[in-house]
């Protein structure tokens, strides 16, 4: 994927200043294998004048690259594009070789200098991937040291893909299908022999059926909706949680997770409720209900929904425009509900008493709330031009977005464990 860039803010070493989004990469079981990191601007801006041969890991000890990277990728593989110049300077050697996948862009000339640099990088234990692969004879040296070959599944004709697969059988490489945008493409790619899959197929409905939503799932949807209503009493929430062993257990695990950095363990339900507050408990209940709905779906679908919910809420908290941050949270949480239930958004919305603001945003992309959701989606896909434009429309400081995104990811990864 040639999503350029990254804004390191010159000498600023704060991870929160980094403009980066992550695109999931799945294995054949639809489990997360890693994330491609989509940076803003050119990576050369990150290392101006730094010679990778003399730079040490200590130089970056408090920067994004060994602290923020694990937060962004949840310790999964991080696929990072490297240009010709960065490869020559051995910049990949500054990254963790256990989690970093060094992507060689398709326009990198495979001359002797590059082959030598990549050989050295490979010998240090890095995973090598060839991006947007199209066979050329001068690539054979790089193919031999590569671990993963990425093929654009939409731009490459299927017959050509089959020929590439046959040609690569003699090499010990895994095949990754890029731009897999629906489940039909995922199944075709899997049948063709691909091991890894990149794209947003996981967030699309698998089959649109004419059947009604099962009553159990409707119940979970109603819990999500009720938990975010302003007139639900605190005492009712406490009673509901206390009488449900499963939810009580998950609540105590959640409140004692590393996300909260508690010095002392929280042992009672009442204490957990007090610590989270009414708003936090409401959100927790809706997230537990959502996790039940996605039990037979890729876990990334839950993470993506939660990231959107938190991202939307954080933006709403930082403005005085009168937009309800709780409503924004609910909007983000329901933004993938059609993929979760494999049904149309229209059919699902007809079953739920959500506000007209939320329905208008989800069904028609209309209203002020829809602008927030568009901004979140633009950020998560690395569409940086739209991010800038929508930030201005909403009136939110663009500089705050990386902070919100990272916080949303960390929170979502903590939630996804429960």
Image (cartoon, rainbow, N blue to C red):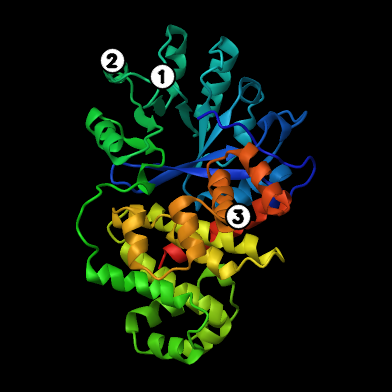
Quadrant hosting residue 418: bottom left
Give me the residue at 31% from left, 15% from top: 160
Q: Which residue is mark 1?
A: 144
Q: Which residue is mark 2?
A: 163
Residue at mark 2 to residue at mark 1: CA–CA distance: 18 Å
Where residue 18 appears, as percent x and y from the top left, is 67, 46
Q: Nearer the viewer, mark 2 or mark 1?
A: 2
Give me the residue at 71% from left, 35% from top: 46
Q: For mark 2, does the 10 Å Cα neighbourhood hold few (<14), some (14 to 19), or many (20 or more) residues? A: few
Residue 193 vertical placement versus 264 (above, below): above
Mark sitting earlier along the chain (3/2): 2
Mark sitting earlier along the chain (2/1): 1
Q: Is residue 253 visible?
A: no
Residue at the top extreme of this rendering: 137
Give me the residue at 37% from left, 35% from top: 180
Q: For mark 3, does the 10 Å Cα neighbourhood hold few (<14), some (14 to 19), or many (20 or more) residues? A: many
Residue 296 vertical placement versus 274 (above, below): above
Dot 3 lies on which element? helix
Where residue 181 appears, as percent x and y from the top left, is 37, 37
Residue at the right extreme of this rendering: 11
Give me the residue at 42% from left, 7% from top: 137
Dot 1 lies on which element? helix
Q: Is residue 338 toward the left or the right of residue 131 in the image?
A: left
Q: Nearer the viewer, mark 1 or mark 3?
A: 3
Q: Is residue 269 visible?
A: yes
Per the rendering, the mark at residue 406 is 3
Q: Is residue 110 toward the left or the right of residue 363 in the image?
A: right
């Amino acid at each position: 994927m040639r999503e350029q860039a990254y804004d390191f803010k010159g000498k600023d070493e704060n991870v929160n200043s980094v403009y980066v989004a992550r695109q999931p990469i799945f294995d054949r079981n639809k489990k997360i294998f890693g994330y491609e990191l989509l940076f803003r601007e050119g990576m050369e801006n990150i290392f101006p004048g730094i010679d990778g041969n003399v730079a040490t890991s200590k130089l970056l000890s408090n920067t994004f690259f060994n602290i923020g990277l694990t937060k962004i990728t949840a310790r999964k593989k991080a696929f990072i594009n490297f240009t010709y110049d960065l490869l020559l300077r051995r910049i990949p050697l500054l990254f963790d070789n256990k989690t970093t996948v060094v992507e060689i862009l398709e326009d990198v000339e495979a001359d002797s200098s590059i082959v030598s640099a990549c050989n050295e990088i490979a010998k240090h234990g890095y995973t090598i991937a060839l991006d947007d692969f199209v066979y050329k004879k001068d690539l054979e040296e790089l193919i031999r040291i590569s671990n993963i070959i990425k093929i654009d599944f939409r731009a490459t004709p299927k017959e050509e893909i089959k020929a590439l697969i046959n040609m690569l059988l003699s090499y010990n490489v895994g095949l990754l299908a890029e731009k897999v945008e629906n489940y039909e493409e995922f199944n075709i790619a899997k049948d063709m022999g691909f091991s890894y899959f990149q794209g947003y197929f996981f967030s699309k409905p698998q089959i649109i059926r004419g059947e009604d939503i099962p009553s159990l799932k409707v119940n979970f949807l109603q819990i999500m909706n009720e938990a975010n209503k302003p007139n639900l009493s605190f005492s009712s929430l406490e009673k509901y949680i206390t009488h449900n062993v499963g939810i009580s257990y998950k609540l105590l695990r959640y409140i004692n997770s590393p996300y909260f950095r508690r010095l002392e363990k929280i042992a009672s339900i009442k204490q957990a409720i007090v610590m989270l507050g009414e708003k936090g408990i409401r959100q927790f209940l809706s997230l537990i209900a959502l996790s039940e709905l996605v039990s037979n779906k890729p876990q990334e679908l839950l993470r993506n929904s939660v990231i959107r919910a938190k991202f939307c809420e954080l933006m709403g908290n930082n403005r005085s425009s009168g937009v309800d941050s709780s409503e924004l949270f609910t909007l983000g949480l329901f933004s993938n509900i059609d993929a979760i239930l494999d049904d149309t958004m229209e059919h699902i919305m007809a079953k739920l008493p959500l506000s007209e603001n939320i329905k208008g945003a989800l069904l028609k992309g209309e209203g002020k709330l829809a602008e927030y959701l568009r901004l979140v989606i633009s950020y998560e896909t690395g569409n940086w031009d739209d991010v800038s434009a929508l930030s201005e429309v909403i009136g939110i400081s663009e500089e705050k977005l990386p902070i919100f995104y990272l916080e949303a990811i960390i929170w979502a990864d903590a939630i996804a464990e429960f």
